[in-house]
Image: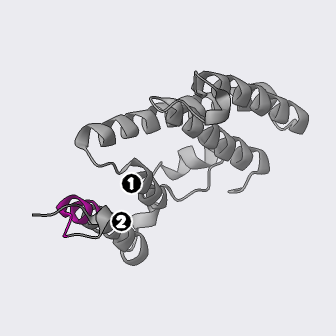
Amino acid sequence: LSKGRSKGYGFNFLDLRIQLGLTVGVAALVYPSLYVDGWNEIGMASELKKQLMLAGKFPTWCVLGFIVSFQVTLEGAVQKCLLRVAGTVLGGVSALICGNICGKNATANIIYLLVSYAVAVSQGANPINARLGFNLQWGYAAQLFTYTETIIVLEAFLGIDS
């Protein structure tokens, strides 16, 4: 009978299950990104990508999404994935609004991003004390909002794919 790995005893099946799950999941996503022809081209239609001025290879982002969304329980993973979707969609919508309002005006883009960051962080901050980081229940969506918005606005502003 195990008295716990933290005390130097025995074997912890839960640790092994988590380590194997993470390893197999990452390997299953990395392998096609490296070795399957055409995998990195999966994403939006070329014409839509050019209209939105996006250059990123979307399948390579799935590895990062898997790593940060992997949780010990199914419920935790589902919650993290839903927060990821919400933050990404809201960040994309905000970036689209920014592009329509600010265009190629650098000052306007910076002001828009700073104001939207302030709103996102104020809503996603820990309710007890902002110095404690983001709200553990749904602050992850605010983080993804700022990441997504920044990536899209910078790619569109710099015209990376043109």
Circle 1 sits on which residue? Answer: 66
Q: Position of residue 60 (x, y in %)?
A: 47, 61
Identity, as a three-letter code, of the amino acid under mark 2 = Val
* First to last magenta residue range: 10-18
Q: Is residue 13 magenta?
A: yes
Q: CA distance from mark 1 to mark 2?
A: 7 Å
Query: Which quadrant of the structure image shows residue 52?
Result: top right
Q: Which residue sits at x=44%, y=51%? A: 68
Identity, as a three-letter code, of the amino acid under mark 1 = Phe
Q: Position of residue 4 (x, y in %)?
A: 23, 61
Circle 2 sits on which residue? Answer: 26
Q: Nearer the viewer, residue 38 or 12?
A: 12
Residue 34 higher or lower than 154, as above or below: below
Left or right placement of residue 58 versus residue 1 in this view: right
Tell me if I can see residue 47 in this picture.
yes
Point out the residue furthest to the left here.
1
* Mark 1 / mark 2, whichever is N-terminal: 2
Q: Position of residue 122 (x, y in %)?
A: 66, 23
Q: Nearer the viewer, residue 112 or 54?
A: 112
Q: Position of residue 107 (x, y in %)?
A: 90, 34
